[in-house]
Amino acid sequence: MKHLLLLLAAFTFFGSHAQQTDVVDFLEIRANLYASPENKTIEGGIEVTFKMLKDADSVYLDAVNMERLSLDGDYDNMNVEANEDKFWIIGNFKEEKEYKIFFSYRAEPKQTLYFTGDQIWTQGQGKYTSHWLPSIDDMNDKIEFDLSILVESEKRVVTNGALNSLTTRDSESLIVWNFNMDEPMSSYLVALVIGNFSKNTIQSESGVPIELYFRPEDSLKAEPTYRYTKEIFDFLEEEIGVPYPWQNYKQVPVRDFLYAGMENTTATIFSEAFVVDSIGFNDRNYVNVNAHELAHHWFGNLVTETSGTHHWLQEGFATYYAHLAEKEIFGDDYFYWVMYQSAEQLKELSDQGKGESLLNPKASSLTFYEKGAWALHILREKIGDEAFKSAIRSYLQKHKFKNVNTEDFLSEVRAATDADISNWEQDWLQQTAFKAMQAYSSLSESEFMDSYFQVSSLRAGQLSEKIDLLEKAIEEGNDFIGQEAVYQLSGENPLVSQFLYEKALDSDNLFIRQAVAISMDGVTERLKPKFERLLDDPSYVTIEAALYSLWNSFPNDRARYLDQTESIAGFQDKNVRQLWLALAIITPDYRLENKSTFVNELRDYSSAKYSFEIRQKAFEYLAELQMYNDEVIDNLVDASVHHNWRFRSGARNMLKQLSEDPEVKKSLYERLDQFSEKEKQYLTTKIISE
Ligand SMILES: [Zn+2]
């Protein structure tokens, strides 16, 4: 009976080639949920409100591998049945009528909801929210989601919308966090984070509350991590010209995230790798991702692409507005530099015949993001600031909380300008090649880029003939031109290049000094004192490179360099600390009594206690030093089934190499029973069998 009903239901829709969005509009999903870290399951009740656009005998919610539990109340003979990827709501539904149904469910999500250490978090885009919450995978049905989450009282919950209330349960050991959203959105933007967090709350100029989350132990990193957040928010509201359309804004870093950041409505999740102190900020800050995810709150969340063909309306716009925000903060030179970098990459792709149209739904990220940003930059130059901003405003206002295609944007542009944009459409939207000439002629409007091109054009020249120009470039102290000059010294005769390196090491500019640390091959006696000062530079990139170069160049001073840098951890991946451990381990006679502690510390960094960024580095050093043991190999097995595919595939390659040693293979075989089911399956099919 059940199967027959499902068959009939499926027939109603797909037999007539109708989309479900033509039949029903889901209006609201209210869910009360509990995620169990022990069982890695999620369960709870959901109340679904929908309005029929046509008569039908069933509608569905996407729900992957979910079990329907109770169905409470009297629902006019409605029923809910589960199959492998849907909940079918069955009834006698009439056009124009609204229906509501409440039922409970349980799921053991294979993706989208992740349990990492003491955190739980989700990634909806590309992974489908329907793995943990019954919802609609089609972006074209916008729903108001109100989530209530039950957690242990010491945990904090971040999800979409505004926190309405906190209610305690079971004599205060559990708390229900009730959130409310005022407006609808596509299901891929639903998010949930549970963890131990502190937060700082600030407010935009327009009065929007902005909550900035961090681990309690990272309290000193909160300011540098979130530096310029208010400036970015105020700038984007002003620049876009449409007020931020949601109740509040929250940002939260999580362990082992899949991407740099994700713009879940009012609840951006980003990678913990962007959590930095003031030194780390100089090298690797969150500003660009911060602005990009916020810009999506207009471009993507407020107006959402109808399909992948129009993906540039989200990524191209978010990338472009993030570049503008960075221009506001870091200045014009930085903006042109970033645009130049992306033009170089796009030109290379295009020269190889691999250029892609912006309207190709299968295009690469580089096309959607950077070519999209270039398209907008050129369009704005063509039609002027005023027409551009006016088109953006009416495009957003006309289509707010709805879906859009490229034509929706273009018709607002045409309405805002007398200029003919048909060539632009051809060159920047349809054309597969990258219009490098247009891009470079736009770049050369910048005096800075002009000077940069003068210096970079010297690359092939003799050092003796360009020495004065390089000296001038280093003295003038521009980040990018100075770096370019230093890079041109690489491989040159030290007798000639030395005095320029000396000048660069004396520069006030951090990035010029950093270029020396990264690119100089071998430190000479004459440069030694100045080079040693790099160990105190406020840059973890510089310190890491300088420590290695000095250690390499001056064997008699190794202990001194190690003593001096012992307490420096570096970025979130502990780049300086892990290099330090590797060097301390292989430096003969250095702290013999502590050697085994150093080895243990490095091995420990490969364990699941740490983020994948830390573990990846540890595995690399341990491989280089040949310091694998059973414990490290077990950690590698764990890594080879990790949810982050890049980390996982690196670990798999290492494990394959190691298991070429019959001893390793034998040991894995003997210990097979101590691994998890997933690990065991991987080992038996890919490692031990071969
Ligand atoms: Zn994006």
Image (tube, grey):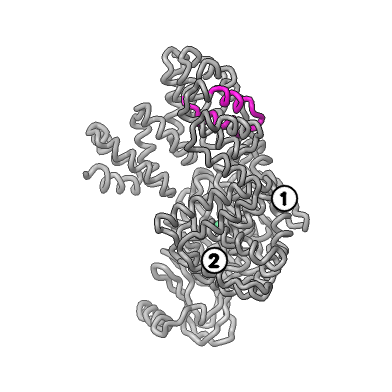
Placement of the C terminus among the 4 image quadrants:
top left
Q: CA distance from mark 1 to mark 2?
A: 28 Å
Q: Which residue is mark 1?
A: 230
Neighbor class of circle 1 (other Cα within 10 Å; few <14, some 14-19, many 20+) is: some
Amino acid on which disc 1 is placed: Lys
Q: Callout 2: helix, strand or loop?
A: helix
Q: Which residue is rendered at x = 68% and y = 44% of the image?
A: 227
Query: For residue 187, which numbered disc appears in the image?
Result: 2
* Foreground: disc 1 or disc 2: 1
Quadrant of the image occupied by residue 1: bottom left
Prevalent SS, magenta region: helix
Amino acid on which disc 2 is placed: Ser
Query: For residue 558, which numbered disc appears in the image?
Result: none
657 or 162: nearer the eye? 657
Say whether residue 136 is visible. Answer: no
State left or right for residue 204 relative to residue 109: right
User: Where 583 falls versus 37 (above or below)?
Assistant: above
Residues drawn in magenta: 498-521
Specify whether tag 1 is near ligand 1 (CB below 8 Å).
no
Residue 220: % across, % down: 67, 36
| Residue 666 belongs to the span the image colors magenta | no
- Ligand 1 image-quadrant field: bottom right
Say whether residue 649 is visible. Answer: yes
